Image (cartoon, rainbow, N blue to C red):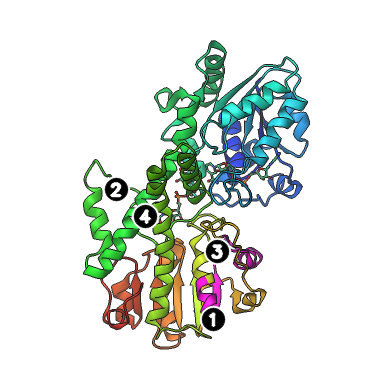
Amino acid sequence: MVKICCIGAGYVGGPTMAVIALKCPKIEVVVVDIATPRINAWNSDQLPIYEPGLDDVVKECRGRNLFFSTDVEKHVCEADIVFVSVNTPTKTRGLGAGKAADLTYWESAARMIADVSKSDKIVVEKSTVPVKTAEAIEKILTHNSKGIKFQILSNPEFLAEGTAIEDLFKPDRVLIGGRETPDGQKAVKALKDVYAHWVPEDCILTTNLWSAELSKLAANAFLAQRISSVNAMSALCEATGADVSQVAYAIGKDSRIGPKFLNASVGFGGSCFQKDILNLVYICECNGLPEVAQYWKQVIKINDYQKSRFVNRLVSSMFNTVSNKKVAVLGFAFKKNTGDTRETPAIDVCQGLIGDKAMLRIYDPQVNEDQIQRDLTMKKFDWDHPLHLQPMSPTTVKQVSCVWDAYEATKDAHAICILTEWDEFKTLDYKKIYDNMQKPAFIFDGRNVINAEKLREIGFIVYSIGKPLDGWLKDMPAVA
Ligand SMILES: NC(=O)c1ccc[n+]([C@@H]2O[C@H](COP(=O)([O-])OP(=O)(O)OC[C@H]3O[C@@H](n4cnc5c(N)ncnc54)[C@H](O)[C@@H]3O)[C@@H](O)[C@H]2O)c1
Ligand SMILES: O=c1ccn([C@@H]2O[C@H](COP(=O)(O)OP(=O)(O)O[C@H]3O[C@H](CO)[C@@H](O)[C@H](O)[C@H]3O)[C@@H](O)[C@H]2O)c(=O)[nH]1
């Protein structure tokens, strides 16, 4: 029986391993983590992450061939294949701060693998890492290996949160990079055999190590670039009377462009896009390619611009001040169907409104008050000037309350701000909401989920991203 151990029971390690266990009943899969509360949650009825379909998969194989444990060393020692799925955040200090990937967790996992191993192993990079990381990891493993053979593979993960189980069941492709030596190719085949239990052969791509590592950063950069491109267009649409949804539909019909990932929004969020592009920028700079670095940096700059443009539009529309005004914030997660708030645009928008002294009442169906308070009081990192940490004043917390219902959040409010595209926001009783709000009642739709025309008929002043502006907004001063 092949034994797999995965180090890191997070958003990637948990769902990925659960699906491998489900599809490969003859493989024993143990997911290990140093965070005891996380492992306890994986072993309980309340899983540590919200992901549609995940509960069923875990219930079917937990205790059969899927296990969660804090006994990291034991399970690494016993495994034939060790996936490393630890976090690789952006460095916040030292060389490369604000851009480079922080590989502390990865390195400590690699050292531990070298220390505890007593048999040959395949070590799989599941985390997103800078290109050439495998070379460094190989050095750590071979220097401490006591004659044990390690083969390093790169097998980046492409799942998106909110659709992780769907993505894992039917991936567009699985990518495996390995050394082009007989032993390297043997390891590639062993990992390919695992995925071949459910992924069609022609969807399993094999490449050299560096191509696999770089493809992950490249895929995220291309995806994020599409969003920044359509968001840049959304600003021009508002200035000209074009409608960004119509423009996106029209260009997406060109099969060379394609229709997906062209939804204009308040900005992209999530733990990956910004971090991976910053990482790419840093790698370009280190390789003496400043023009290429600047090109990709612009994707993040447009994303920041989009978030501040949204706050500016909101404030300027409401007579240039939101001081002491009640703003209902609907949605805090970085996208629908997840409770994850890492890098959510809601943090920047809410911090911007708090800075203008607004009183926020926030509702998200999957994010609790503790998380929201933590996110909003978090020190804001200035990526361009990493030494300048900008702490939020603790008093800002008092400007924020969290409720468990959209109607409660909007009661008595001056404005509504939609920051996550949860389906339930499409079907709220907006007439009832309007009747309970202060007038004029504003709605700023950062996700283009509401029917603006219907809401205008009710009486709302509506702002949608990249859509023709209604009379009120046109009359307000232009925003920077
Ligand atoms: N979140 C996503 O949707 C996604 C998708 C594709 C790829 N990725 C990449 O996958 C990696 C993991 O992301 P995530 O979102 O699952 O992170 P996460 O923070 O949710 O999980 C990482 C886990 O690793 C654990 N860990 C850290 N060091 C450890 C050690 N030495 N031993 C044991 N456990 C350790 C942490 O306690 C944590 O639970 C990152 O590199 C990320 O870029 C993420
Ligand atoms: O047309 C779109 C599509 C997405 N978004 C936003 O972009 C962000 C990221 O969305 P998405 O890519 O769906 O979620 P992630 O879970 O961040 O997944 C991305 O990042 C993962 C981590 O690397 C990769 O594995 C995935 O392939 C990649 O899609 C979210 O804030 C979305 O709201 C838009 O604004 N407009």
Instruction: State the residue position of label 2.
Output: 259
Beta carbon at label 3 within 8 Å of ligand 2 = no
**Observer-nearest residue: 44 or 242?**
242
Residue 357 is marked as: 1
- The spot of residue 427 in percent (x, y) is 41, 68
On screen, residue 421 versus residue 341, left or right, reads left
Badge 1 density bin: few <14, some 14–19, many ≥20, Cα 10 Å: some
Q: Could you tell which of marks 1 and 4 lies nearer the N-terminus?
A: 4
Instruction: State the residue position of label 4.
Output: 228
Q: Could you tell which of marks 3 and 4 lies nearer the N-terminus?
A: 4
On screen, residue 430 versus residue 113, left or right, reads left
- The spot of residue 227 in percent (x, y) is 37, 53
Which residue: 57% across, 18% down? 187
Instruction: State the residue position of label 3.
Output: 365
Badge 4 density bin: few <14, some 14–19, many ≥20, Cα 10 Å: many
**Observer-nearest residue: 33 or 211?**
211
Badge 3 density bin: few <14, some 14–19, many ≥20, Cα 10 Å: some
Which residue: 60% across, 58% down? 387
Magenta stretch bounds: 352-381
